[in-house]
Image (cartoon, grey):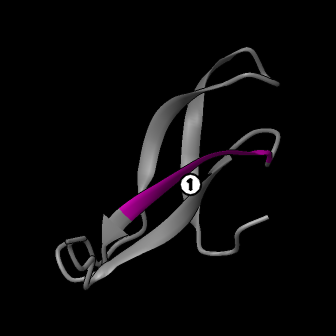
């Protein structure tokens, strides 16, 4: 039997420099009220940049 996800939402992570959507992830909207801001690798910039959360999926 599959588990119910409940308060988890799917969000996209956008590169701060080139604005490309590189990652999809989930976050719990109750435990983390603020938007995610993570340092991840961008394959178009070819370096680690800050990626911001966006609810709009492409």
Whole-percent x, y for residue 48 in the image: 58, 21
- The one nearer the camera, 1 or 58, is 1
The image shows residue 26, relative to residue 56, as above or below, that is above
**Direction top: furthest residue:** 46
Whether the magenta-drawn stretch holds residue 7 is answered as no
Q: Residue at x 25, y 85 (%)?
A: 6
Residue pictured at 46% horizontal, 54% vertical: 25
Magenta stretch prevailing secondary structure: strand
In what element is the residue under mark 1? strand
- Please name whichever residue, 12 or 17, is drawn nearer the observer in this view of the structure: 12
Q: Where is residue 10? Give x, y as percent.
A: 49, 69
Q: Is residue 35 left or right of residue 11?
A: left
Location of residue 36 by image quarter:
bottom left
Q: Quadrant of the N terminus?
A: bottom left
Eyeballing the image, is 23 above or below 32?
A: above
Along the line of sight, the residue nearer the viewer: 52 or 56 = 56
The local crowd at label 1, few if under 14, some if 14 to 19, many if 20 or more residues have their Cα within 10 Å, is some
Tag count: 1
Residue 54 spot, x, y in % from top left: 61, 67
Q: Does the segment drawn in magenta span residue 22?
A: yes
Image-quadrant location for residue 7: bottom left
* Quadrant including the C terminus: bottom right
Magenta-drawn segment: 20-26
- Measuring 21% from the left and 83% from the top, which residue is drawn there? 30
Instruction: Answer above or below: position of 32 versus 37.
Output: below
Residue at 47% x, 33% y: name it: 39
Pointer 1 residue:
52
Q: Quadrant of residue 47?
A: top right
Instruction: Return the residue nearer the eye: 7 or 13.
Output: 7
């Amino acid at each position: 039997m599959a588990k119910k996800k409940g308060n988890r939402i799917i969000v996209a992570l956008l590169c701060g420099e080139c604005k490309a959507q590189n990652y999809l992830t989930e976050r719990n909207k109750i435990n983390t009220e603020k938007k995610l801001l993570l340092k991840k690798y961008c394959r178009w910039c070819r370096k680690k940049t800050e990626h911001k959360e966006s609810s709009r999926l492409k």
